[in-house]
Amino acid sequence: MKSYPRAREADTMRPQGTAGEVFRVFLKLGLTSFGGPIAHLGYFRDELVSRRKWIDETGYADLVALCQFLPGPASSQVGFALGLLRGGPLGALAAWAGFTLPSALLLILFAFGASSIEGPVGTGLIHGLKVVAVAIVAQAVGGMARNLAPDRERASIALAALLIVIFVAGSIGQVASILLGGLVGLWLCRAAPVSAVGHLSFRVSRQMGAISLILFCLLLLSLPLTAGMAQGLALLDSFYRAGSLVFGGGHVVLPLLQAEVVTSGAVSNDAFLSGYGAAQAVPGPLFTFAAYLGAVMEPFPNGIVGAAFALVAIFLPGFLLLVGALPFWDAFRARPSAQAAMRGANAAVVGILGAALYDPVWTSAILTPYDFALGLTGFILLTVWKAPPWIIVVLMALGGVMMGLI
């Protein structure tokens, strides 16, 4: 295996940007990333892999595969890791804040009495934003397929992963397809040359990783024991546990949250459902729905304090697990056999994205020939004209409003 001089390794470990730069980039993504976690990965790829070159295609796919294995919001975890890579620990926090705060603040405003969008204009606007996700995810699938499934072996792995996800719904199918992709990759993907590694060092020591994993477990075990001591601890326990026990992103966490806050009477079912509807109309991660719930819960802490508590509690376990896994993940992928497995796993990620392109992205957005024409327009603007994603968001939203008025 090719080795690198010590000085070069130290250079690659040094963040190449600042927390301010990371915050600005992720704030733009937080304001324009509609469509859910799969679409977010497409936005990240376009902005940070294709345009800014913060990470290469294979490294990005490695991060996606890692975050698919971990509980928590996969797209936010990928963003957190990219911020860590670019700007160190402060960059990681800046990435989370920039990507999360826009939707969290909008949902808090809604909790304080902002009226929901109604009528043909509002319905058309929301539908247009769903069509945006079709164009973004289609672009991501095409680009990743060219880079990560370029031969018969990896294309076959991608197809098998797609079939697994279709026939085994939910996070079980996703995790199983990545595991099987890695196993098949050990057999079929050894012929490719060994890739140089060392450029994905996240400045996280094994000691820090172990501390993060221990802290994750301590909080998961201790918060239920202390929840009865104060309402604030009970709130932290509910949202931390929800963020700890869910795979597959924001939509999967909703039943857990409903069981925690509606069954206990802290939030009415009507308020819960209206907040969920509002969460569909804002950009960024769906986990920010926790900020809305924290704001409307009874009794105190609620309002701004409750929103802050809930928001931090639901994201924290996923980030602790990510920091705990990163130092071991980087050493794992440095081995030739691990690289072969990762080629298979990366191809499986392409299949997972392909399945998601159809359901739920396509099936929830492309309902008429007009929707298809609008989505195809966005796809051409992205892939041929290389238009920035935020322009596509604006145009697709306006197109949805026009269709809603017809």
Image: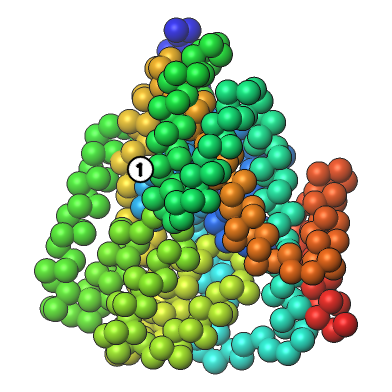
Instruction: Classify 81 as above or below 12.
Output: below
Closest to the observer, 306 or 234 = 234
Instruction: Classify 112 as above or below 92.
Output: below
Quarter location, residue 206: top left
> Residue 51, how many percent across, how many down?
72, 39
Is residue 372 visible in the rendered image? The answer is: yes
Quarter location, residue 17: top right
Residue type indicated by callout 1: Val
> Residue 363, how many percent across, how many down?
66, 63
Is residue 43 visible in the rendered image? The answer is: no
The residue sitting at 32% across, 49% down in the picture is: 320
> Residue 253, how many percent across, how many down?
40, 66
Q: In the orientation shown, which residue stands out farthest toward the front? A: 167
The residue sitting at 36% across, 59% down in the picture is: 246
Instruction: Classify 193 as above or below 115.
Output: above
> Residue 344, how many percent across, how many down?
50, 28
Q: Does residue 379 appear left or right of residue 107 in this picture?
A: right
Q: Secondary structure at mark 1?
A: helix
List the residue tagged with mark 1: 323
Q: Does residue 184 appear left or right of residue 226 in this picture?
A: right
